[in-house]
Amino acid sequence: MVQQSNGAQYHKKQQVNNMKAVNNNGIITTYPDVPKSFRSSTGYHLNARSMTADQLRDAGLFDVIIDENYDSRIHTLGEIYWDSAASIFRKDAEDITWSESLSELKERRINNFKGQIGSKLAATDWYIIRNADNGTEVPIEVADARQALRDQSDSVESEINALTTKKKVMQYDFPNID
């Protein structure tokens, strides 16, 4: 997992994980890790977690390799298949096809960021309301911080609007607003 500056997580360049799979008479079963037990064409295997890597392979349980280019923002994972040359299962990255137009994707991403900015601004809205109600001055550091958030929002909007492909729009990393 990669941690984005805004806290979101996504997969990027993940080659090997703990995922395992077994082909049992043409039906591939996947596991997030070595299971406690599993059935393969060689039988039912108990206490699989105590088996060695060689014993697991001999029993038919193999690693699943995720395409090194996989990025969940722009890819889905294809169907699992057996790579006989490498004696492993694989899942390839496949490009996502978005139904939205480029401008709709831009609007969605911009609105997402503006929502994050709005949440940050909401924390200090009471200063603005108090100022409107009774004229109490808004502290300069609060006013400056609010303006910086609005400036950052405008900058992100401009940057996203300058992007020319759906893929680039979806790969755009929002700056940290904390």
Image: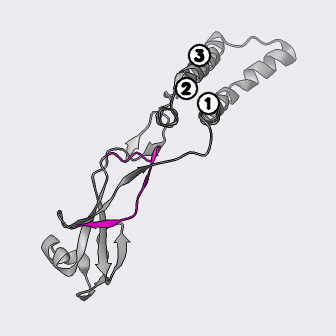
x then y, percent, for residue 132: 84, 16
In the displayed structure image, the side of residue 105 where residue 95 appears, left or right = left
Name the residue at 58% across, 23% down: 161
x then y, percent, for residue 49: 24, 75
Give the residue at mark 3.
Answer: 148
Picture colour scheme: one colour
Q: Residue furthest right?
A: 133
In the displayed structure image, the side of residue 122 where residue 70 appears, left or right = left
The answer to whether the residue labelled 3 contacts the one labelled 1, judged by CB atoms less than 8 Å apart, is no
Give the residue at mark 2.
Answer: 160
- Which of 63 and 104 lies nearest the eye of the viewer? 104
Magenta-drawn stretch contains 48: no
Separation (CA) of disc 1 from disc 2: 7 Å
- Mark 1 surroundings: few (<14), some (14-19) or many (≥20) residues within 10 A: many
Amino acid marked by disc 2:
Ile
The answer to whether the residue labelled 1 contacts the one labelled 2, judged by CB atoms less than 8 Å apart, is yes
Q: Secondary structure at mark 2?
A: helix
Name the residue at 49% across, 27% down: 175
Amino acid marked by disc 1:
Ile
Name the residue at 74% across, 20% down: 127
- Which of 29 and 81 lies nearest the eye of the viewer? 81
- Mark 2 surroundings: few (<14), some (14-19) or many (≥20) residues within 10 A: many
Amino acid marked by disc 3:
Ala
Query: Within the image, what quadrant is residue 31 found in?
Result: bottom left
Query: Within the image, what quadrant is residue 50 found in?
Result: bottom left
Q: Nearer the observer, disc 3 or disc 1?
A: 1
Q: Secondary structure at mark 1?
A: helix
x then y, percent, for residue 84: 20, 67
Tag shown at residue 110: 1
Stretch of the chain drawn in magenta: 69-83
Separation (CA) of disc 3 from disc 2: 18 Å
